[in-house]
Amino acid sequence: MLDVSSLTGDMSDHADDHELRILQGNTGQEGEHHHDEHGEEEPVDTTVREHALDLATVREKLRDKSGKQYWRTLEELAGNPHFDELLHREFPRHASEWDDAVDRRGFLKLMGASLALAGMAGCGMPDEKNIVPYVKQPDGMVLGRPRFYATAMPFVGDAIGVLVESHEGRPTKLEGNPDHPSSMGASSAIVQASILNLYDPDRSQTTRFAGEIQTWSSFLEAAQGLAAAAKSQNGAGFRILSGTIVSPTLGSQIKKLLTLFPEAKWHQWEPASGDGSREGAKLAFGRYVNTVLVPGKANVILSLDSDFLASAPGHIAYAKQFSRRRKLDSPSDTMSRLYVAEPTPTVTGSSADHRLPVRASDIELLARALAGKVGAGPAATLPAETEKWLSTVAQELQNERGASLVVAGEQQPAAVHALAHAINAALGNVGTTLYYTDPVETEPESNLESLRQLCADMGAGKVETLVILGGNPAYNAPHDFDFLEKLKKVHSSVHLSPYFDETSAYCNWHIPESHFLETWSDARAYDGTASIIQPLISPLYYTKSAHDVIAAFSDKPGVAPYDLVRGYWTDAMGHSEAAVEAGWKKWLNDGVIPNTKFPAITMTSKWSASSLPAFQAALAGQIEFIFRPDPAVYDGRFANNGWLQELPKPLTKITWDNAALVSPKYAEKMELEHKVMARGGEHGQVRSRVLDIELNSSKVTAASWTLPGQQEDTIVLPLGYGRTRAGYTGTDKGFNAYVVRTSNALWVATNGKVTSTDEGYSLACTQYHFNMEGRQLLSSASLAEYKKNPGFAHEGVEAPPKDDSLYQEFSYPGYAWGMAIDLNKCNGCSACVVACQSENNIPVVGKDQVMRGREMHWIRVDRYYAHAESKTNDPSTYNPSLDNPETFFQPVPCMQCENAPCEQVCPVGATVHSAEGLNDMVYNRCIGTRYCSNNCPYKVRRFNFLRFQDWETPQLKLMRNPEVTVRSRGVMEKCTYCVQRINNVRIDAEKQNRPIRDGEIVTACESACPSEAIVFGNANDPNSRVAKLKAQQRNYSILSELNARPRTTYLAAVRNTNTDLVKE
Amino acid sequence: MAQIFHRSANYLARFSLLGAAVFAGVALTAVLVVARSPYITNQNVTRDQPIQFSHKHHAGDDGIDCRYCHTAVETSAYAGIPPTKTCMNCHSVLFNNVGYLEPVRESYRTDQSIHWVKVHRLADYVYFNHSIHINKGIGCSSCHGAVNQMPLMFQASPLNMQWCLDCHRNPEKNLRPKDQVFNMDWRAPANQDEIGHRLAVENKIRTTAELTSCSTCHR
Amino acid sequence: MSAPEIPLNSHPLYNPEPEPVLEPGHTYASVTDKISSIVLTRPLGIGWLAGFTLAFSIVMMLFACLAWLITKGVGIWGINIPIGWGFAIVNFVWWIGIGHAGTLISAILYLLNQKWRTSINRFAEAMTLFAVACAGLFPLIHTGRPWMAYYMFPYPSTMGIWPQFRSPLIWDVFAVSTYGTVSLLFWYVGLLPDLATLRDRAKQKWQQYIFGMLSMGWRGSAHHWHRYQSAYLLLAGLATPLVLSVHTVVSFDFSVAIVPGWHTTIFPPYFVAGAIYSGFAMVLTLCIPLRKAYKLEGFITMRHLDTMAKVMLATGEIVAYGYFIEFFMAYYSGNKFDVFLAEQRLHGPYSHFYFALIFCNILTPQLLWFKSVRRNVPLLFVMSLIINTGMWLERFVIVVISLTRDFMPSAWGRYSATFWDYGTFVGTLGLFTMLIFLFVRGLPAIAISEMRELVHQESHGKEGHV
């Protein structure tokens, strides 16, 4: 259906803007409220308006200033009352005014023209026509050769070791650190995207007091003042609020500070990781312990609503171990079996051999029943079909005593975790498939209670000084705590945060936080292994780390983080400076400190399941709302990260928004239809019903989305969206689920009221069509079938003979690059997508463009529901096969076809076959006829319909990979197996006069993949990993009947199904 | 009715037909010629530098090896422009007070880089790698000309794609023994063809198909 | 004056009775007066001015659209991945198709010695040129980087590489440009004697000059006429194969690709037939108002309309056959992709386009079986419009629907045109109309010399019969 809706012709869809406002629900009110508040804080002196600053003046003052000088000038400016008004006028409030990536230019020109650029001038951007050599070149630096440094990214109770690729001092790419336990060489979408946060132009750049620019020195004075005041009353009224802290140094700093202020308190709040595991351990063992899983050793795993493959500390390592147990070289191989019981589909659930949709609240019942069956507690009765499922599972777990594993989910209550501990103990798994260590975090405590107490104190006016280290409580605290109101009662508040966010706006002091690539620190991984975090670049702006802030209040203000870290480890190493000195270089080089891994401790249960109170099952048909961190932006801290915003979420394939996820049955009941819009269609724009959700005496308006496989009565409210001060990219996207989240129903809420409005909301969904229309795209079988018929992937497809082409065969005397993707291992986590984006300078296009079907990802992850006989292909028209479909993921990069359809139709030869079998894409030759894309059966080509690439923002220029051309408007682009990496390795190999070794070239997607699903190499060499995989019978190529003969082939997925559970 | 055209108009008409054809031809040729001329390629154009650095003096008369300054040429894509430090190695003692070297000393004092003007500029989408050419036996002078004869640096070759391909399509013309790579005065001997082919085998020069794959230079 | 040597009455199609191709009673003088007066003496009518102004303003809008296109990029259109080609290519093929009738009429019918072509060939050719001009615009502007389009031409570049000759788009470049050039020459050569006539009859000096220049010293000597005849015959011979080749090559753009709905061997004949079909429809659309406005019923008689209607009927049936074969082959070959697409055409999101197409191109023309319909001028006019629309829809169905449902269901999408798509399309319609307006007032819309030949032959013909 043609429509002329965009008569204005501009790129933003006004209808959507409208609904976007609707979607804000009462966060919008918060926003306004805040504006009044701000007005009170800083009355604008109208009498001197005519002297008000404008950017021109500022630029005048800042001209020719760079680095330090620049900031000195800024200090003078800071005195000017109009300067912060200017700042506010120029930056933060502009943020929400643009909703379209393509229009970002204007905004960034403004930014670049003023502060950002002047700040950047410190880093010296050479004029393109000039060569600006070093005055004194650093030792060991070879111009043009990237160097790799090991460091670690701290993330909610874990630290992920990374190797940072650095070009002439600019970090450009993160890779996993093979020597680091929680990375094992792999990474995740969030890790890959974190480099973008470093260069985010919206980062807060200066210290502020009451919104006015201040200098760090003035904060130091203020902090000392506050410290003195606190000291006078023994620290009473002094509070610190932080997230989960895994940095030993920071931990000890805070503890030291607390010894100075005996009555001061330290609170912790992580909105998206539950207290269940902590409290569960405490319940079971009477103390906090850290549970480390070893899924690699488990033959049978039962996940009780745990997404251990894609979230929670250690998930990368877990995914690696797990996938190695899913490796099938021949039909004789064995494979572990995964059972998952969960309310809503997750990455883990999708790779399960058997998945059971269960209410979040019924998981505990399941756990109790299981405990009963394995003799870890009293029996419990289950509904019939669940009973059958669970008894089969229980049976199998017992058969595999010592080699089985039961994992409880992060969002599950303490009881479930305690039960899991009991069950694992009863199954003799402790010590083999999991073990216990001392807590990794410095000070484990119930976050919820901790925050509750803080708010109580604040309300009671007991809090004089509040120091918030990171985090954004004003946005993500349970709304019944009324954090904001109480914050106003605090005399002086300090907020350390990378952005001037919702919380910063209400704190007296705002300290811009350094990125982990900008500062010295340290962090412990999920198993206790410690790493030194070293800075890869000096702070781009006037930012500080938590170490600096805590130090500012200590008796030694202004100590450099480096000295603090060195100091801590000197103490830790038995106060021997020599020991540290000896190890230091190696620690930095390896990215881990040897022998810091926590030893396993044996725990004895101080608790019996029988002590649990009687279980109240939820009433049948009662709607249950559950809160989950968003797979992309997590708890909202990555809301301003364009790569993550544009990353299609593994299961929904929605970008740029969150949506209230409902089950197909519920959708049918409420008539929540999806409408595929003409603009963009299945590959872009789907319009869904807007829901009014009243919950916990609050209200939010959210777009609905029907998710096959979701438990019938469950509605998922993903956290992390609806930010009002996230920055340009993240502000006013999606809806804010925190608004309806209260302390008594942190993860599961009932008694909500859902009314379906007649409004629609357009979601940017990159893959709506979920069934394969009987085509040979993704072939799968059960392990039994595979053993019976190893070549099942080739059934029913007649691949034409190799020579069935008019064009002559290519010959490959040298290398023939190829890729094999094991669908048995891929769990859809999408780390590869972001890794590729980072490696290949792929632009972000914005929601409007994604809705037009123009996203630029070179590798996409297709999601299919096998055996879903849906004619309409619309999940919102009910069909039983969607209640719990078998879900499969298929990463699709360019296939590098042997008989490439694209090559034959390009009029100018911009895409040509290379001598090593790649389909080279020559951007500078392309004139943009798009014929190649039309003729590409796999639709892996991406086109720069507009000028998507950002050429202005200086920060982003620093981030780009110098090895890859930055594509301009009007040219086609696509995956070329990271040809820049191939070339560099080949050149080195040739210089050393040797062939390239297998595994020496690693593509970005391959190196990022936590489950080792992607393997790249030389298909000509029969001993290469890729050649071996391609030799397997499971190996097949998509749409082989077309005789395009792709170089990228797939290994069919095999599910280790339990015959007892296969229903006829 | 009066004649509006003189008889000669007929000849004019015929001539104009011819003229049009000729003009078209000339115009096209002109375009093709200009595209290859220094006007476009910047070949042989010397540029003003902050310091009138003479390669002739340093590389030619003093016989300083290229690699003394261009240290990365054998290991990296970029040959590398020397840091001020390298200049000062000598010029802290030699000519350490002559006026025209003041910019060098100033740079060293103030820690501000010298802004040299680029002479050899390839398009951003061309990924040239010095080290592999050096290692395969392509001499500096093959592309940069007799630098040791240049008081002021200029671009000796057109540096357009045609020129690159000429060599990538048959490298034998320019291959030289590895010990001759940095010899500015090397000239192709009479039996270059035969030598070139021998070196191509010895140095494992990749096939023309490989050398002319687009991704060899563009990515 | 010399005429082709075939005895007219022996020709099967030659049938002066019951009605002539030229209203009886015309003399050399009357013919010349009537036609040349339109150019020379007739004052600018209000109708012409109004029409021209409208067309001109639409052309201005076209320029606005193009300016915006160059500033922002093709992203202002509705195209996306997977639908990489939208209105631009649809319009291109449509216009090229329209451009067929002219040369067909003037060249092929000339060789077949169809007398009735005489009075319509001149502006049919003009129409061809203008249509090709509009068509030629699209392949250029639809590229992402139009300023780089010269990469498509084989010239010795400093890059040392050539275009990729396996690509149908390159074949297009040659096919279309050759066709354009030959049509232009053919048209201009045909104009020479008339330009001379105008030169001689022009009153104002400037007119004399201009027409004098253009007529390149034509004096109408027997010598000139002899050269003229052979040159015209030669060009006709040259143009004839091109009529068939152009659209065959255009159809290769699709049939060479592997996209279901494109990859089929029926395309060349069915595209050519379709082209002639739409071409004649457009000729009717133009000449019916023209003959009315300038009282040319005498020259463009019912006989012409009737014959053109018959041609449309014939080509229409061929096109219908093409549609049928597409379906037949889909099921006969059993290719699951083609079958799926065939069903999509009937049931998919764009089915209404397909049914509209069937109505316009297959059902409507069936009326032409009836003489009464063929003779009903207003009805004929309406039908010609319907068929033009239908042929545009056909191209839309082929280009867009095929791309929305190709091989990878995960990548399926939809297409919806934006304001700029429509703007550009309407803009070219404006450009076309404007050129036609200029043409009818600036040059003899009917070949005077050939009409005079006709006068001559008509009279002889009658004598021959007596």
Image (cartoon, coloured by chain):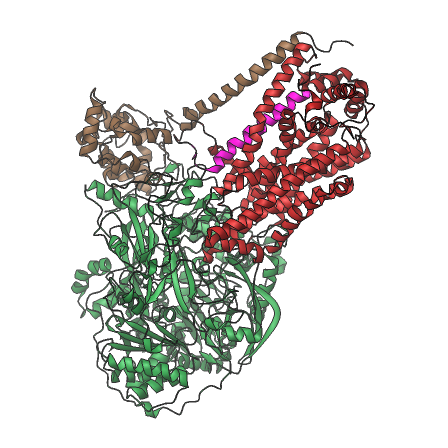
Chain colours: A green, B brown, C red
Is residue C173 found inside the magenta-colored segment of the image?
yes
Is residue B74 found inside the magenta-colored segment of the image?
no
Above or below residue A279? Residue B212 is above
Q: In this view, does A321 lie to the left or right of A919?
A: left
> Image quadrant for the N terminus of chain B?
top right
> Image quadrant for the C terminus of chain B?
top left
C268 or C128, which lies in front?
A: C268
Q: Pinpoint residue A622: horizontal percent, then vertical percent.
A: 51, 83
A411 or B193, which lies in front?
A: B193
Q: Pinpoint residue B143: horizontal percent, then vertical percent.
A: 30, 29
Main SS, magenta region, reads helix
Q: Outermost residue, right direction? A: C25
Q: Is residue C23 left or right of residue A950?
A: right
A966 or A654, which lies in front?
A: A654
Above or below residue A249? Residue A617 is below
At x 43% / y 82%, what residue is drawn? A361
Q: Outermost residue, top direction? A: B7
Q: Pinpoint residue A455: horizontal percent, then vertical percent.
A: 46, 79
> Is residue A887 visible in this depiction of the protein?
yes
Above or below residue C80? Residue A653 is below
Range covered by the magenta-colored residues: C162-191
> Is residue A844 visible in this depiction of the protein?
no
Count the numbered circles shown.
0
A425 or A640, which lies in front?
A: A425
Q: Pinpoint residue A2: horizontal percent, then vertical percent.
A: 61, 53
Q: In this view, does A945 lie to the left or right of C441?
A: left
